[in-house]
Amino acid sequence: MKTDALFDPLRLPNGRQLPNRLAKAAMEEGLAEAGQLPGPAIASLYQRWAEGGAGLLITGNVMVDGAAMTGPAGIALEAQTPLDGFKHWAAAVHRHAPAGTQLWMQINHPGRQVFAAMGETAWAPSAVALQMGKHSKLFAQPQALGEAQIAGVIERFVQTALQAQAAGFDGVQIHAAHGYLLSQFLSPLANQRTDRWGGPIEHRARLLLDIVDAVRAAVRPDFGVGVKLNSADFQRGGFSEADARQVVELLNGRGLDLLELSGGSYESPAMQGRTADGRTLAREAYFLEFARELASVAQMPVMTTGGIARPEIARQVLASGVALVGLGTALAMAPDLPRRWREGSPLTAPRPQVGWKDKTLASIATMALVRRQLHRMSAGGLPSAADSPLFTLLLDQWRNKRQTARYRRWRAAL
Ligand SMILES: Cc1cc2nc3c(=O)[nH]c(=O)nc-3n(C[C@H](O)[C@H](O)[C@H](O)COP(=O)(O)O)c2cc1C
């Protein structure tokens, strides 16, 4: 009988094997408890995904610094953070998932993509604010990082990776996509430094490469280390496909186990299929063309995420030389999609669409619709494709406001 490529195992460079080719992509859960810690809600959500059959679960981004958060209900893991909640989270996955399923923690620093309401100073490669038109004021005006602070950032990524390892996670994914700090360093628009961290791509990539090297050297040899990278920023003058190709070449030979390719940022939300430079992405598997091209250069397994919801498309991704298929929204709407595909179901996950004129608000509302499904599942409920975008956005904003106040109280009490 012909086997289904989606369910072929994949051996990683670190020697460990993933049971299949379907990966749950990172989605910030917005479920932190007080102190930005994980609790039972996040463990329940991941139990659902563990039972759903994806071979690799990548967590939503976990911050390496509690003073630099992508959102008010995000999780932070620092050198001194107590590990109990993290251990329960990892154990929930390993207890309920098919044998061999791995759980990786995505680790991130937001750089300038910090909401002004959080009340913290935003640090970035250069003091260049986000350009979001009339929504620009939502974000803090950043300041440029000094040399010693950059060394501190590298150390934080290492400490967070070591903590993830100690808590029972199987790997970490270093987030260098979507306009966050490492992606800002890679971008000639956000990084206007003239020192060894700015200028040519070898310099702009230095922070990412130093972090990869330092993390790889610190963790166990069989602990997974991956990177999520933009195949391009899709902004005029931004991180280009040629830049991405060079970064992949620079990442070769550094002991990486996985390279996930995505695209975009707040300024150009290509990961939602929409670009700021007017380029058109594929309607499904947005970054497949780029991933195919970069997979021919990459010496580590490549994964691509964005717009994939149908099994035929997932198979097409694998047939292009890409090793893993990343699923975000699809697994928020149907957490057991891999299991169903394995059983032969052709099920396509529904995809929330918000057709508002204000594209920024439409993006935020789409994210809120997806996040709402994560919250439902964390409370034992089922996802629903019938939510009102406006009501969901208002609910999300109300939650955000309360959680921002809680975050500010936590920071003030430290
Ligand atoms: C609610 C939500 C939260 C997300 N959080 C993250 C994140 O923490 N880290 C990340 O790399 N990508 C994040 N993403 C982007 C996804 O990983 C993925 O790249 C994107 O949604 C496109 O894939 P999809 O079409 O399968 O959803 C998020 C997406 C959504 C919808």
Image (tube, rainbow, N blue to C red):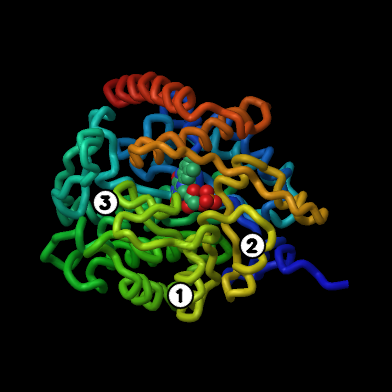
Query: For the residue marked with disc 3, what is the amino acid?
Result: Gly
Q: Is residue 218 above or below residue 338?
A: below
Q: Are marks 3 and 1 in contact (CB under 8 Å)?
A: no
Find the distance from the CA under tag 3 to the CA under tag 1. Answer: 31 Å
Query: For the residue marked with disc 1, what is the amino acid?
Result: Leu
Q: Secondary structure at mark 3?
A: helix
The one nearer the camera, 109 or 339, is 339
Q: Quadrant of residue 76?
A: top left
Q: Secondary structure at mark 2?
A: helix
Which residue in the structure is indicated by mark 2? 314
Q: Secondary structure at mark 1?
A: helix
Considering every residue shown, the one lying at the far right of the view is: 1
Q: For residue 166, say whether it is visible.
A: no
Q: Looking at the image, is mark 3 or mark 1 earlier in the sequence?
A: 3
Q: Quadrant of residue 188?
A: bottom left
Query: For the residue marked with disc 2, what is the amino acid?
Result: Ala
Which residue in the structure is indicated by mark 1? 294
Considering every residue shown, the one lying at the far bottom of the view is: 296
Q: Residue at x 28, y 39 (%)?
A: 114
Which residue in the structure is indicated by mark 3? 152
Find the distance from the CA under tag 1 to the CA under tag 2. Answer: 18 Å
Find the distance from the CA under tag 3 to the CA under tag 2. Answer: 39 Å
> On the rendered image, what quadrant is the C terminus found in?
top left
